[in-house]
Image (tube, grey):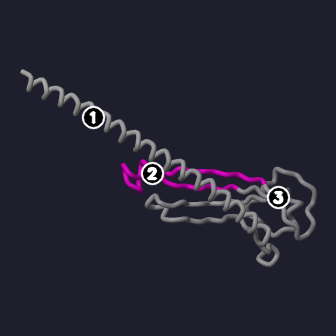
Amino acid sequence: MRKAFSMVTAIFVIVILATIAVLVLNMAATSTYNTTTQYRNEQAALYAKSYTELAIMAVLDYNRTQYNNCVNTINGTIGNYNDGSGYEITTTISYIGNGATLLSLPPCSRVLNTVSISSLPLGSVPDVIIDVYVRYKDPEHIATSGAEDAPAITYHRRTLQKI
């Protein structure tokens, strides 16, 4: 009778240890996923800030009178976006002013005409709104369904810049 009791106790201890092991592994997986998600989001925020600064430099340094147009978009890809390890960045630049104000500028395809400001001197740079969209794929969906089916997460940053 005593040998059977030892076997039941051993099975009971094994079940308890297995349950604890499953809980520890589950917590480790959740912690890893949260860390990865936070890292990807922080990377997207840093890329958005970098592309905002790049857009400001592009607007300031671009010779609109020589090329007779404006900088309207800046696009980029970092890493391989298709397999889920990279980022896809789209930057759109909108120029603020009314029609009379922007007559001295070359034609810009993204002019917001709802704001009325005083006339700009010839050759000056108008104020701009910079929208940066950073897209990346959710790492949990990539692991379960593949990179092609993973939904994209978009981080958006809007900046009003007085130039």
In this figure, which residue is indicated by the disc labeled 2? 139
Image-based side of 88 in relation to 9, left or right: right
Near-viewer residue (108 or 34): 34
Alpha-carbon span between mark 1 and mark 2: 30 Å
Left or right: 48, with 112 as reference point: left
Residue at figure coordinates x 9%, y 23% from the top left: 2
Over which residues does the magenta segment extend?
131-160
**Sequence-first disc among 3 and 1:** 1
Q: Nearer the viewer, mark 3 or mark 1?
A: 1
Distance of label 3 from label 2 (alpha carbons): 38 Å
Q: Residue 84 appears at what percent x and percent y?
A: 46, 58
The residue at which mark 3 appears reads as 127
The residue nearer to you, when weighing 23 against 103, is 23
Q: Position of residue 45 (x, y in %)?
A: 62, 53
Residue 112 shown left or right of residue 20 in the figure: right
Nearer the N terminus, badge 3 or badge 2? 3
Question: Mark 1 — residue?
Answer: 17
Cα separation, mark 3 vs mark 1, equals 65 Å
Residue under the image location 27 percent in, 30 percent down = 16
- Which mark is in front, 3 or 2? 2
Amino acid type shown at disc 2: Pro
Indicate the secondary structure of the residue bearing disc 2.
Answer: helix
Residue at the outermost front position: 2
At label 1, counting other C-alpha atoms closer than 10 Å, the crowd grade (few under 14, some 14-19, many 20 or more) is few
The amino acid marked with disc number 1 is Leu
Q: Quadrant of the N terminus?
A: top left
Please report the residue visible at 67 percent of the width from the left and 64 percent of the height from the top: 73
Residue at disc 3, secondary structure: loop
CB within 8 Å, label 3 to label 1: no
